[in-house]
Amino acid sequence: MSELNNNNNNADEEKTSTDPFIKILNDGNKIPMIGFGTYKLGGNTLSVRDAVKYAIEIGYRHIDTAIFYGNEKEVGEGIKDAKIDRKELFITTKLLWYDDHHETGKGQTERAVDASLKRLGCGYIDLYLIHSPRGKHNIRTYQALLKCKEQGKIRSVGCSNFGVHHLKALEAAKLPLPAVNQIELHPWLQQTEIVRYCRAKNIAIQSYSPLVKGKKIPNESKPLNQQSAEHKKLIDMKKHYDQKSVAQILLRWNLQSGHIVIVKSSTRSRIAENLDILNWTLNDHDFAVLNAFECGYHCTWDPTSDAIAEHDGDQW
């Protein structure tokens, strides 16, 4: 693999490994920069099981799931079918934000972790995230995940959809900072405040919905004179990169910005296409054009802005 070019961007200055597409987390563990996402995967094309198997076979080494997705078992089956050494994979899952998974002192979180391990059948989980700050008792829950880490059930503990005020609450509780914060991130939503804080605290940023659920990708079957100005810019960029799609350009922006990126498809050709963002770079001009798309556009939910509230006298 060629080296990740950070000259054109504001990529963070966290530790890097000898492999430029592996990031070293703040706890010393290593994470691949591209992950295969499984949210709402499956349907009329590949099943979750077959998609995960195929993704691993063509080179993905980071698989992302969640209890909420309802597919941990199928993800685990796909991993098993791929017949790859467990040590070669990085597996992420996420804790539900419902009361029966967040900790109140009755062992809910550890039971949820154990259930994930059983469904995935993977021996240990590389990264376990609190899926959303909307759950109650986040401090206790985070502490319970750290306990699971001490027991060897989890290698790294992180969060998803946490805003700066949520991260500061963990810090105020004198807890180790998360290894990762997974947030919606793409040129139209660059989450500058969260990214800046995480970089300062050496919390790795992981991007989900990097293709904006397709909502900002041009329909190239339409004549150019019927395209918006923004879509014309995206289509024009393709001329600079041999046989690269608009989707690949958007994914490359995320990777080149220093973010771990979660990509998803249940079509073999697109699973392969999404992985082909490593050995080329966006030029300075195109990178700047994409940066200028920022408009605060959320294509999905936004728990990062949720207020912090105490629950039953307990810390948030």
Image: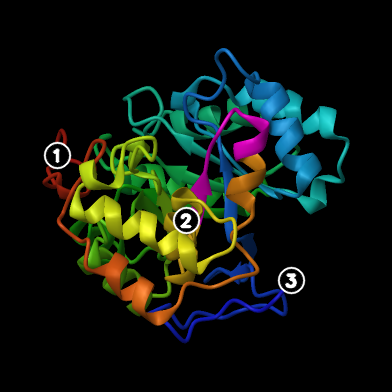
Q: Is residue 264 left or right of residue 196?
A: right
Question: What percent of the width, then of the height, locates residue 100?
Answer: 38, 22
Local crowd size for mark 3, using a 10 Å CA cut-off: few (<14), some (14–19), many (≥20) = few
Question: What percent of the width, then of the height, locates residue 22?
Answer: 64, 67
| Residue, disc 2 | 251
Identify the element where label 1 is drawn.
loop
Q: Is residue 89 above or below residue 173?
A: above
Look at discs 1 and 3 and give the one toward the viewer. Answer: 3
Q: Rounded to the nearest whole Å, what is the CA distance between mark 1 and mark 2?
A: 43 Å
Q: Rounded to the nearest whole Å, what is the CA distance between mark 2 and mark 3?
A: 17 Å
Residue 180, visible in the rendered structure: no
| Residue at the outermost bottom position | 7
Q: Rounded to the nearest whole Å, what is the CA distance between mark 1 and mark 3?
A: 52 Å
Q: Residue at x 70, y 42 (%)?
A: 124
Q: Amino acid at mark 1?
A: Gly
Q: Residue at x 75, y 34 (%)?
A: 54
Q: Is residue 191 left or right of residue 114?
A: left
Q: Residue at x 28, y 51 (%)?
A: 231
> Considering depth in this image, is 273 or 160 the residue closer to the camera?
273
Residue 162, visible in the rendered structure: yes
| Residue, disc 1 | 313
Question: What percent of the width, then of the height, locates residue 70?
Answer: 51, 19
1 or 2: tag closer to the N-terminus: 2
Query: Residue 1 shows which numbered tag?
Result: 3
Q: Amino acid at mark 2?
A: Leu
1 or 3: tag closer to the N-terminus: 3
Q: Amino acid at mark 3?
A: Met
Magenta-tinted stretch: 261-270
Question: What percent of the width, then of the height, locates residue 197?
Answer: 28, 72
